[in-house]
Every structure is written in C-alpha cells, then in structure tokens.
C-alpha cells in the first residue's frame, strides 16, 4: 500500500511545467526551483525530483521511465509470488512422496 501524496497531482504538474519553462530561459534559470517552490508552497527538492522524473519520462535525460519502473516492480512482485508458490509445491510434493514410501499397515 502506498503512502498518501503530500501534493495534489495538479500542483505537481503545474510546478513541473513552470520549472521546466524557467530552466529553459537563461535569465530565470538560477534559483528556479527555490523561487517556484516558494511561490507554490512546494519544497525545492521535491520540485527538482519531479522535474528529473519528467525529463526521464520525456526522453530528455537517460534513465528508467516511470512506466518502466512500475512494470519492473510489478514483475518483481509477481516473481516473488511465483517463487513462493513453487517452494510450497516442492514441499507438498516431498511430503506426499514420503507418504507413498511409508509401508502401509
């Protein structure tokens, strides 16, 4: 279960858009995260993280996209469940094989 989001999605999108626009202009590039963060009530590090994720998702920066990361996490979770089920089935088959080897009365 995920933790609740501190900032609404609309605020996140708006802040990210403003930060990307500010970084594109050399005159407003310096201190853009801090300035926009203070204006919108968002911590500058959160804003920096959002911008980095957006740049990766748009292909402007190398890295794993959000959709790929979610898919990898889902596959890892499924893999853990399958390994656990496989271990249970191996134990059950060993138990029943031992029952067959025992002499009956």
Image: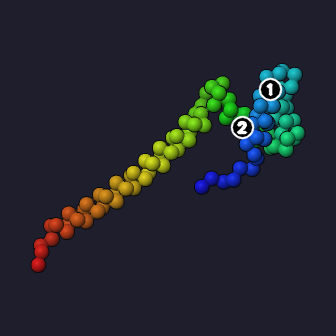
Of all residues, the one furthest to the top in this rendering is 26
Q: Name which quarter of the figure residue 84 lies in.
A: bottom left
Which residue is at 75% across, 36% downward? Answer: 13
Is there CB contact under 8 Å for labels 2 and 1? no
Measured from the top left, where is residue 72 in percent x and y? 51, 40
Q: Residue 50: which numbered mark, if any?
A: 2
Of all residues, the one furthest to the bottom in this rendering is 105
Q: Is residue 18 above or below residue 2?
A: above
Of all residues, the one furthest to the front in this rendering is 10
**Residue 45 visible in rendering:** no
In this rendering, position of residue 25 left or right of residue 81 = right
**How was this image coloured?**
rainbow
Number of marks present in the image shown: 2
In this rendering, position of residue 85 left or right of residue 6 = left
Q: Is residue 38 above or below residue 2?
A: above
In this rendering, position of residue 35 left or right of residue 84 = right
Question: Which part of the image, by quadrant, shows the C terminus?
Answer: bottom left
Measured from the top left, where is residue 21 in percent x and y? 80, 26
Which residue is at 59% across, 33% downward? Answer: 65
Which residue is at 75% across, 46% downward? Answer: 8
Secondary-structure class at tag 2: helix
In this rendering, position of residue 91 left or right of residue 59 = left
- Residue under label 1: 21
Secondary-structure class at tag 1: helix
Which residue is at 60% across, 55% downward? Answer: 1
Q: Is residue 88 above or below residue 40?
A: below
Q: Name which quarter of the figure residue 42 lies in.
A: top right
Circle 2 residues within 10 Å: few <14, some 14–19, many ≥20: some
């Amino acid at each position: 279960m995920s933790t609740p989001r501190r900032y609404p999605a609309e605020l996140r999108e708006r802040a990210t858009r403003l930060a990307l626009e500010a970084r594109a202009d050399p005159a407003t590039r310096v201190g853009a995260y801090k300035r926009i963060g203070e204006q919108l009530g968002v911590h500058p590090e959160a804003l920096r993280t959002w911008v980095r994720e957006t740049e990766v998702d748009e292909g402007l920066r190398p890295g794993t996209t959000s959709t790929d990361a979610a898919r990898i996490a889902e596959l890892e979770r499924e893999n853990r469940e399958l390994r656990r089920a496989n271990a249970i089935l191996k134990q059950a088959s060993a138990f029943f094989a031992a029952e067959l080897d025992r002499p009956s009365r």
